[in-house]
Image (cartoon, grey):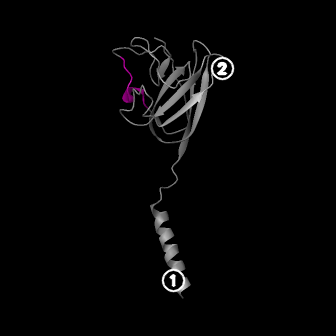
Amino acid sequence: MKITIITLLAFSFSLTLYSFAKPNAKTFSLAIEVKNLRNEKGVVQFALYNKDGSIPDEDYENYYKIVKGEIVNGSSTITIENIPSGKYAVNILHDENKNGKIDKGFILPIEGIGFSNFQSIGLTNRPNFSKASFELKENKSINVKVIYM
């Protein structure tokens, strides 16, 4: 009798915990490609962001996921899998010396950078999450332009 009661209590507890578990959310893949890199030195760092205010992120502290891609024939492509639907932005760094950070001259970056939805960057066109973001609700491929200043 005690074993039956304990088994029923354990089953009820398990069922209760399961009912609070998050249902299996559908996830998607994001393929990101950069072309026309100025050389084949180093790697391309692809940073994916999912929060307003997370970019610009010069020290790469606020990213959701980060992946490094090899450079082949002046291009680099990666695919990030298992991303829940939502709003995202991409930041690219042509990390020529493989140190994982944006190297600068006096003020401007000396390595190539890029953001989703940006063809140029300047004082009047500074990147932020709102401008760089896009909705991910299906598998998606994007191209990001790398800008050398």
Compared across the picture, whether 8 is left or right of 132 comes to right
Does the magenta-highlighted stretch encompass residue 130? yes
Residue 101 image point, x, y percent: 48, 24
Residue 90 image point, x, y percent: 48, 29
Rounded to the nearest angstrom, the CA distance separating label 2 from label 1 is 64 Å
Compared across the picture, whether 108 is left or right of 92 comes to left
Amino acid type, residue under disc 2 in the picture: Val
Does the magenta-highlighted stretch encompass residue 108? no
* 25 to 63, vertically: above or below: below
x 49%, y 64%: residue: 18
Q: Name the residue under label 2.
A: 72
Local packing at callout 1 (Cα closer than 10 Å; few below 14, some 14-19, many 20+) is: few
Amino acid type, residue under disc 1 in the picture: Ile
Residue closest to the eye, 35 or 4: 4
* Disc 2 secondary structure class: loop
* 138 to 104, vertically: above or below: below
Q: Which of pointers 2 and 1 lies earlier in the amino acid sequence? A: 1
Residue closest to the eye, 71 or 121: 71
What is the span of residues highlighted in magenta in the rendered image? Answer: 125-133
x 51%, y 26%: residue: 100
Q: Name the residue under label 1.
A: 5
Local packing at callout 2 (Cα closer than 10 Å; few below 14, some 14-19, many 20+) is: few
Residue at the far bottom in the pictured view: 1
Residue 78 image point, x, y percent: 60, 30
x 61%, y 23%: residue: 76
